[in-house]
Amino acid sequence: MPVVHPANVAEYLEFGLYGWALSRFAGCWVGFKAISEVVESGMTVDLDRVLLAFEQAVPYTPPACGLHSRWPEVPSASIEERMAAQLQATRAFARVNSIDRHIVSSPNATLGIITVGKAHFDFMEVLRRLDLDPDALSAAGVRLYKVGLVWPLEPTRIDEFAQGLEEILVIEEKVPIVEQQLKELLYARPDTQRPRIAGKFAPQGEPLLPLIGELRPSRMIAVVAAWLARLNPALDRRHLLVDFTMLKLLSNEGDGVKRTPYFCAGCPHSTSTKLPEGSRAIAGIGCHFMASWMNRETGGFLQMGGEGADWVAHSRFTTEKHIFQNIGDGTYHHSGYLAIRQAIAAGTTMTYKILYNDAAAMTGGQAVDGKIGVPEIARQVEAEGAKRVVVVSDEPEKFNDRHGEFPRGTTFHHRSDLDAVQRELREIAGVTVLIFDQTCAAEKRRRRKKNEFPDPPRRVFINEAACEGCGDCGVQSNCLAVIPVETDWGRKRQIDQTACNKDFSCINGFCPSFVTVHGRSCENTRKASSRTMIWRARSR
């Protein structure tokens, strides 16, 4: 399968169209490599510079059997022959329509650098940090070639690029797909015409660029600087690495400040992932897995649909009697329900905490596919044989007139009773289910802006004069909207009103410094300081 690898958002458009055109011409699937650093980014794109059409007049004659699959067809030699013909058609199409780019051309070059996908812009950042630019590379006899179609490589342009080079450095992430193809393409050349290839390993065999993890600028700058200096003393910039070493100490390996992912302000997981003393939980797919680094006795990690499957086996070989398994509502509806079914069938003792947040929050807040609600989940797990089903909510009263929609014996509790409920469930043999119902905080915020979700006319503030700075409000709520503020009397706490999503769990602690404003919208909150709003509240 041919594979294209876009390096930024603009190339997503161009390479996507290219993939469709190539697929139609060659009769095969085309792979599209998507990595999170590019997917979760944005940029302004000049559509006039995006290649939207491709030349279809390609000098290639397909075999008599054609390139496209035919039905019905069983595995046979003819399929393999067609696959080989599809790759030939791919190379023919790529010769006429190339998404590879000669970034730096140098007629008398002796060195070459090939970059792939995101690694291209990482390399350009390395050049910037080394105080080099493409003109400096060209003047020093270095060519730079950016690969877009990573498999199969288009050989005629590779031959053109490699002409006269003594050594080529390949910069790509993970497995050396391009590097290995390059070695195969150039292997048959005479020794005097075959350049040395460096990449994941140096020509002599020692490790060079890392195979594991993200290939970010900080991980390649020392390698690139040493490689350039060894082969061309005019490009020696290793003296800049002294400053770079200090930069790494100050900014997490020199690639900018990193922020550990955390629950949003008012996130229901800040409450739902709490555990009673003496218990532990297993993480799953979803925002709630971040509880793993929040000192909440939560660990482990399984694929979507496998939540709890490991405990089904482990429980046979341990004296530990019970665990909690976290699972989101989207995951439950996708395939997690099957894991619960399997755990019940195996007679395992555990509690599934189904975190019903009313949105697939981790991937952008989409609605869960299909019809699913708290009553439907309760009936499903009860029908499979769950020993006990309980519902915990920040608003349990909303179910008061709906008990008939739930299985007989279902009990309803406020989230303040979570600890007691969990202690009760962990003593029950077999699979029990706790459905924690609270809407995703980010979704609440979005819906409130569109007047699609109730917005309580209530705000919480902290009177800094009364606050003793103990931080218990942050412990109780685990909320990022509770922030430190430096005062003349030391560090106190403050509610960041621009981040607050009105979860109100910060007031659970025993603290006299909290002030609540009722019955009035706080439309000026973004402009006024927390302290100003406190005194307005007191004056009223």
Image (cartoon, rainbow, N blue to C red):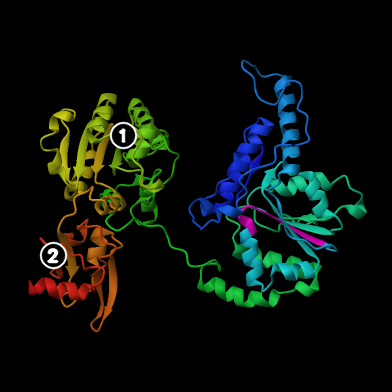
**Quick one: quadrant of the N terminus?**
top right
Which amino acid does the dot numbered 2 rest on? Answer: Thr
Q: Quadrant of residue 126?
A: bottom right
Give yes or no for contact between labels 2 and 1 (Cβ–Cβ under 8 Å). Answer: no
The residue at the far top in this view is 72
Residue receiving disc 1: 349
198, 424: nearer the viewer: 198
Q: Secondary structure at mark 2?
A: strand
Where residue 88 appears, as percent x and y from the top left, is 76, 34
Q: CA distance from mark 2 to mark 1?
A: 43 Å
Which numbered marker is on residue 270? none
**Quick one: quadrant of the C terminus?**
bottom left
The residue at the far left in this view is 540
Q: Residue at x 24, y 52 (%)?
A: 448
Q: Main secondary structure of the magenta part?
A: strand
Magenta-colored span: 111-120
Residue receiving disc 2: 516
Q: Is residue 227 found left or right of 493 in the rendered image?
A: right
Residue 345 can be seen, yes or no: yes
Number of residues whose C-alpha sits closer than 10 Å to that of mark 2, classed few (under 14), some (14–19) or many (20 or more): some
Of badges 2 and 1, nearer the viewer stands: 2
Residue 1 can be seen, yes or no: no
In the rendered image, residue 114 lying in the magenta stretch gets the answer yes
In the rendered image, residue 385 lying in the magenta stretch gets the answer no
262, 315: nearer the viewer: 262
Which amino acid does the dot numbered 1 rest on? Answer: Thr
Compared to residue 110, the image places residue 297 above or below, namely above
Compared to residue 295, the image places residue 72 above or below, namely above
Q: Residue at x 80, y 73 (%)?
A: 233
36, 60: nearer the viewer: 60
